Image (cartoon, rainbow, N blue to C red):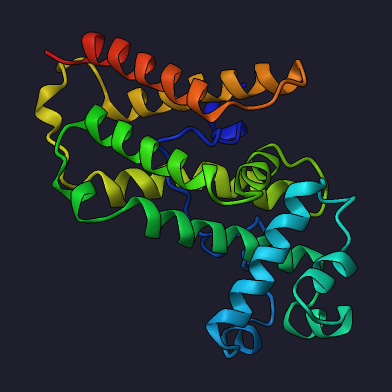
Amino acid sequence: MNRSDHPAAPTPGTAPAPASDVTPASGAPASAPRRGDFDALPPERQEAIMRASLEGFGRHDYKSARTADIARRAGMSKGLLFFYFRDKRSLYLRTLDYLTDRFIELVVDEDFYAIDDFFDLMLYAGEQKVASLSRWPWALEFAVRAFYADHRDIRQAAAQWTNHQVDVMFDRFFKNVDFSRFRDDVDPREVLDMLIMLGDGYLHQRLSSREPIDLDALMDAYRRWCEILRGWAYR
């Protein structure tokens, strides 16, 4: 399976791109809810709805998640929920956007842009993300389900989102990295792909064995991967 066919795993150092930036083959936006109505809500109401959605789609897979339960957790009727989102798919994709925005807010700060070493930046982003996930209920479960989404309603959009995020992340968040540290025969983008594939393998192994994902253990493994690749990739 080549990289373009496989969704990028939610490894600690990756920051996702908005689902609304991804377009399906038809050319129409992947996420097209009635966003004007939702965006007009007070921020605290938007947050309540998104957190309820995050929990609903984190507790259950896409098919099993019930919009009635999400509406109840958000303190509203199901009918009102669908006034803001035309269907379940639109709500799901907007929740991907919400998760994207929160991760960027929590990970990308002044210290982030002060780091010019590729691996130090990946480790900093990973530590910030893991710290956020550990105190943010259902974010990890939702993220993992999104990266391995298989329901026909969201499979294509979620795969496009997870693949597209790598391009956006590399262009947007690595602009201050000093790539001269890399050997001439090493492509930094390929090193990023290696880290993603290592994370993918780790998560797949845990999920296949039905073992819980231990964020501390994942971060320990991530540090080892970065050090191994640093020793190979740098001059």
Residue 37 in the image: above or below residue 14: below
Could you say which is closer to the camera, residue 103 or residue 174? 103
Could you say which is closer to the camera, residue 92 or residue 214? 214
Q: Quadrant of residue 116?
A: top left
Q: Quadrant of residue 125?
A: top left
Using residue 30 as the reference point, say whether residue 119 is left or right of it.
Answer: left
Could you say which is closer to the camera, residue 58 or residue 136? 136
Q: Residue at x 25, y 27 (%)?
A: 119
Q: Residue at x 73, y 49 (%)?
A: 58
The answer to whether residue 184 of the structure is visible from this angle is: yes
Q: Residue 109 location in percent, x, y? A: 26, 55
Q: Quadrant of residue 193?
A: top left
Residue 230 in the image: above or below residue 111: above
The answer to whether residue 31 of the structure is visible from this angle is: no
Residue 121 in the image: above or below residue 57: above
Using residue 59 as the reference point, say whether residue 225 is left or right of it.
Answer: left
The quadrant in which the C terminus is found is top left
Could you say which is closer to the camera, residue 39 or residue 186? 39
The quadrant in which the N terminus is found is top right
Q: Residue 70 location in percent, x, y? A: 80, 66
Using residue 165 as the reference point, say whether residue 144 is left or right of it.
Answer: right
Q: Residue 10 location in percent, x, y? A: 54, 36
Q: Residue at x 37, y 43 (%)?
A: 128
